[in-house]
Image (cartoon, grey):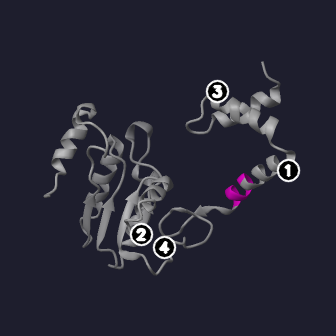
Amino acid sequence: MHAAIIENLIEKFEQLPGIGRKSAERIAFHILEHMSPDEAAAMSACITEAKSQISLCPVCQNLTDCAPCKICSSSKRDASVICVVESPEDVSAIEATNEYNGLYHVLHGSLSPMDGITPDDIKINELLLRLSDGTVKEVIMATNPTVNGTATAVYISKLLSPFEVKVTRIAHGIPIGSDLEYADKITLIKALEGRQTM
């Protein structure tokens, strides 16, 4: 239906998460119809630059353009607390709350035996190395409330038992603004288990 070059462009956009065929077509045609050659070249250069200059922080494993990253090198952060997350997007979500002032550790995934993802495939060993000097007093497990995320949190908490650190798990439950009648059974159970004194 489309020229081969256009079809190839659409297919590339379709490979992005959350982008279906229709969205990929809209993006491709927007670039072709509304962007100048200079704008398209600038976008391409930006992607190339990001891929070549962004790497993993040697401390927390988050994406960064400096080593260590700005969070790890900040003297204003509480170095005694590490929040363990699955992805760099999770760091952004927690930072957006402006309520957390500790450090992070990005696993880059979660354990999934069905998909062949083992402890060696995610950044667990790097986390254990960070605990060797005794600075860290608490590790917050903020992996996703999925089967794999929960299994990962439990696995890591067992590995941390020899260290003198408090291991906590973020609370899960009913989202603010939602109705109980629409919550699934597991969410309701977690909400009841995580109840707090008022």
Count how many numbered circles sit on residues in the image.
4
Which residue, given by chain and number where applicable, does mark 3 sit on?
Answer: 22
Gap in Å between the C-alphas at discs 1 and 3? 25 Å
Residue 6 shows in the view: yes
184, above or below 70, in the image: above
| Secondary structure state at the residue bearing disc 1 | helix
Disc marking residue 72 = 4
* Residue type, numbered disc 2: Leu
Q: Are marks 2 and 4 in contact (CB under 8 Å)?
A: yes
Seen at 56% across and 39% down, the residue is: 17
Task: Name which of mark 3 and mark 4 comes first in the sequence.
Answer: 3
Q: Nearer the viewer, mark 2 or mark 3?
A: 3
Task: Name which of mark 1 and mark 4 comes first in the sequence.
Answer: 1
Task: Judge from the rendering whether residue 107 lies leftward or rightward of residue 135; answer left or right.
Answer: right
Gap in Å between the C-alphas at discs 3 and 4? 40 Å
| Secondary structure state at the residue bearing disc 3 | helix
Residues 180 and 142: in front is 180
Which residue, given by chain and number where applicable, does mark 1 sit on?
Answer: 38
Q: Is residue 83 magenta?
A: no
Gap in Å between the C-alphas at discs 1 and 4? 37 Å
Q: Is residue 50 magenta?
A: yes
- Quarter holding the C terminus is bottom left
121, above or below 163, in the image: above
Task: Name which of mark 2 and mark 4 comes first in the sequence.
Answer: 4
* Residue type, numbered disc 4: Cys
Which residue, given by chain and number where applicable, does mark 2 sit on?
Answer: 103
Gap in Å between the C-alphas at discs 2 and 3? 40 Å
Residue 9 shows in the view: no
* Residue type, numbered disc 3: Lys
Task: Name which of mark 1 and mark 3 comes first in the sequence.
Answer: 3
Q: Where residue 3 appears, x then y in whole percent?
A: 83, 24
Task: Name which of mark 2 and mark 3 comes first in the sequence.
Answer: 3
